[in-house]
């Protein structure tokens, strides 16, 4: 499904990823954990297609295609979804209008007909309910005036509506209280399936108690330095990243 | 023959057929105003207030008045310009003159609106004071020219304490000819004490095919529109203005407003059309507690030049003024915003804010934003701000990461930049109509409609 080989990425001339190797088979949920500054967000942005992130070596193959050759919207339409750590506030663009435009762009790519306003509302409402969101909030300007938790739920709402094939959740747990975390985790778990692959990027083990991964990788110094099953996360929680940071340095 | 000689020739030939030619005071006013124009000539960038807007393109000779008789326009033709979902009283002016056959009856219970020509025929009592004296100031040269040539316009009086339920829509349409022509409209509006009303003013072009295709060189004309507004004490007037002229046109307009105690003037001015456009607003807050909101948007592309020049004079205590202008510029478009706020010595407790924000979609687009504060009182709150920038890359990335293509994402963000201001500043029917026009603008549609 996703195969990353020897990926090197620089941001503003500074090397951040220094040879990431990672294979995520279809339908699996993999967690990428690591200390601050290890390159977690760089990896997620690079996979989503940020143009100011320079790939200096390596490759990423997604569904047999060269992911790095596609632009941002092409990747999204092929099913790559990044749930942002810091979702962007966009004054003047209504959340519903935006989401309908996004869904129809996605459907067009999949050869499906565009949904009309009524059909869209049905899809949106069903997911708004699952995520226990406020209907009114979603109608307002996108993410404007949302609390941190509301923004994260809104990301998962978009994910639920767009039904991606590869979802990258970047620090989705940060800024969530325990109740909100459960709701978000519940939403994400509901989206797990044999044709949906997920990368959970997180600093803490907490999220992984609610979304249990098939595999856990440790990213440190811009490389994957260890991989294991879900118990690796518990070890990290107990012992910290110090051992891996030393190894990376 | 010099360019001013051609104006003199045009004035001599046009004057006898202009409305009110038989009214002595008006004839004298026209002549005095014309002389003032001759003394000053067309404004050039040597004048401080015309530094960024050059009228060279107006040509080497006076333009003849636009012809009166235009066939082929009926109410159906007007449909694209008329607001949906709201009952307006519409006055239609074609080539600067009222077309009674296309207009609603001007006599309604709470406000009456007639053409300037009709008001002059019947000797309307407010006219002389509203037209005022001739001005010798070089900055006023185009207003002087308007006084000399004014062909028609709307004369409106909103009855004291009345709240007419229907907005009044003044629709100025120009039908371009094979050679360039000029129209001089003059509107006079009195909002009576304690009244409340909405007036919509639209300027657009109707053409025979070529216009809708936006071909260069054709469809050229000059609109010179001057509007004088008086708000009596406690009056509220919302004034929505849309300049959507042909991309070959020159649109030069001046709106001057006097705001009495506790009255509130709210202007929203959108400029989308014209090759070169300048809208001047001069507002004087002459009574205690007067309020003035000037808001506007401008959208330019190709080599359009769009100028908004405002002057707000606080001459009485406790006045409140707000200005927010937002512009979007693509290609080689050039915008000018000059906003001057003057606070007189007596105008204590004045609260005045001004903001000009520009979104540049191209590296070749250009803005001159010039705020000017002149404060002669000590107990005041005044501020101004200006920003100019490109589309937010973070926001673009976010939208694109949700499958939305670059072009559509840019459109969404561009629309969002102006749409909130439109929603805040206008009645829903106008705001909705303008949103439709904005969507068309984003899709690249030129202004104007063809006559079927």
Image (tube, grey):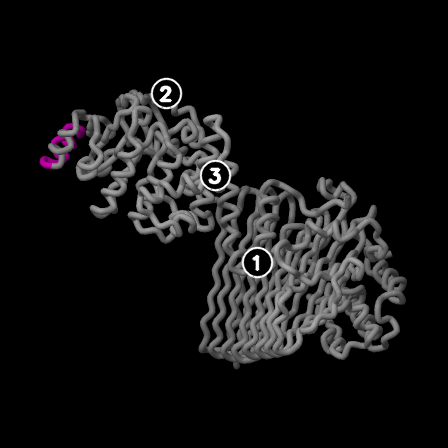
Which residue is farthest left? A239
Q: Is residue A248 magenta?
A: yes
Q: Chain of mark 1?
A: B
Which residue is farthest bottom? B346
Q: Is residue B253 above or below residue B447?
A: below
| Mark 1 touches mark 2? (CB < 8 Å) | no
Say which residue appears at 82% left-offset and 60% top-offset.
B4
Query: Of marks 3 and 2, which one's residue comes earlier in the chain?
Result: 2
Magenta range is: A238-249
Q: Residues within 10 Å of mark 3 (few under 14, many from 20)?
A: many
Residue with the mark numbered 3 = A101
Secondary element at tag 3: helix
Q: Chain of mark 3?
A: A
Q: What's the distance in space between the residues labelled 1 and 2, CA to CA?
A: 50 Å
| Quadrant into which the C terminus of chain B falls | top right
Residue with the mark numbered 2 = A63
């Amino acid at each position: 499904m996703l195969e990353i080989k020897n990926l090197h990425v620089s941001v503003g001339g500074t090397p951040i990823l220094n040879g990431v190797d990672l294979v995520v088979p279809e339908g699996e949920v993999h967690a990428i954990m690591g200390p601050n500054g290890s390159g977690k967000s760089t990896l997620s942005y690079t996979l989503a297609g940020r143009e100011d992130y320079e790939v200096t070596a390596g490759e990423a193959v997604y569904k047999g295609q060269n992911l790095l050759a596609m632009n941002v919207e092409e990747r999204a339409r092929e099913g790559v979804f990044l749930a942002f750590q810091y979702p962007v506030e966009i004054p003047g663009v209504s959340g519903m209008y935006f989401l309908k435009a996004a869904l129809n762009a996605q459907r067009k790519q999949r050869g499906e007909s565009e949904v009309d306003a009524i059909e869209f509302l049905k899809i949106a409402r069903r997911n708004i309910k699952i995520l226990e969101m406020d209907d009114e909030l979603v109608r307002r300007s996108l993410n404007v005036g949302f609390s941190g938790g509301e923004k994260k739920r809104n990301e998962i709402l978009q994910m639920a509506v767009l039904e991606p094939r590869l979802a990258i959740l970047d620090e989705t747990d940060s800024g969530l209280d325990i109740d909100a975390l459960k709701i978000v985790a519940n939403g994400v778990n509901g989206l797990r399936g044999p044709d949906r692959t997920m990368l959970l990027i997180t600093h803490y083990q907490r999220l992984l108690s609610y979304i249990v991964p098939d595999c856990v990788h440790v990213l440190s110094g811009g490389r994957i330095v260890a991989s294991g099953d879900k118990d690796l996360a518990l070890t990290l929680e107990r012992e910290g990243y110090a051992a891996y940071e030393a190894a990376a340095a | 023959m010099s360019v001013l000689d051609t104006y003199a020739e045009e004035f001599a030939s046009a004057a006898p057929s202009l409305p009110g030619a038989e009214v002595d005071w008006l004839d004298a006013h026209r002549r005095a105003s014309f002389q003032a124009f001759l003394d000053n000539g067309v404004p050039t960038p040597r004048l401080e207030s015309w530094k960024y807007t050059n009228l060279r393109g107006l040509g080497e000779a006076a333009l003849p008045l636009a012809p009166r008789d235009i066939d082929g326009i009926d109410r159906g033709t007007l449909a694209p310009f008329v607001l949906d979902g709201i009952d307006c009283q519409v006055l239609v002016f074609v080539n600067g003159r009222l077309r009674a056959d296309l207009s609603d009856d001007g006599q309604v219970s709470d406000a009456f609106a007639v053409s300037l020509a009709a008001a002059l025929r019947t000797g309307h009592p407010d006219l002389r004071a509203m037209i005022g004296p001739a001005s010798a100031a070089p900055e006023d040269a185009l207003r002087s020219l308007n006084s000399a040539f004014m062909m028609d316009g709307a004369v409106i009086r909103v009855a004291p304490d009345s709240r007419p339920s229907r907005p009044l829509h003044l629709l100025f349409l120009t039908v371009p000819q094979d050679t360039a022509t000029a129209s001089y409209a003059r509107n006079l509006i009195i909002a009576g004490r304690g009244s409340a009303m909405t007036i919509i003013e639209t300027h657009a072009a109707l053409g025979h095919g070529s216009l809708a295709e936006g071909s260069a060189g054709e469809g050229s004309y000059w609109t010179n529109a001057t509007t004088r507004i008086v708000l009596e004490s406690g009056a509220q007037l919302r004034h929505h203005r849309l300049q959507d002229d042909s991309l070959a046109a020159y649109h030069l307009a001046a709106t001057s407003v006097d705001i009495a105690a506790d009255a509130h003037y709210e202007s929203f001015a959108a400029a989308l059309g014209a090759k070169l456009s300048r809208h001047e607003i001069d507002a004087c807050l002459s009574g205690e507690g007067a309020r003035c909101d000037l808001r506007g948007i401008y959208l330019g592309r190709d080599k359009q030049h769009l100028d908004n020049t405002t002057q707000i004079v606080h001459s009485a205590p406790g006045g409140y003024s707000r200005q927010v202008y937002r512009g979007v510029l693509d290609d080689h478009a050039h915008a000018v915003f000059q906003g001057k706020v003057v606070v007189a010595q007596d105008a204590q407790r004045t609260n005045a804010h001004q903001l000009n924000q520009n979104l540049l979609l191209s590296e070749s687009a250009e803005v001159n934003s010039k705020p000017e504060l002149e404060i002669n009182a000590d107990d005041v709150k005044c501020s101004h701000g200006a920003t100019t920038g490109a589309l937010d890359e973070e926001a673009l990335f976010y939208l694109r990461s949700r499958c939305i293509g670059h072009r559509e994402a840019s459109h969404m963000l561009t629309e969002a930049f102006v749409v909130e201001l439109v929603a805040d500043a206008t009645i829903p029917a106008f705001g909705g109509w303008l949103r439709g026009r904005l969507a068309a603008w984003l899709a690249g549609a030129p202004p104007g409609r063809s006559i079927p």
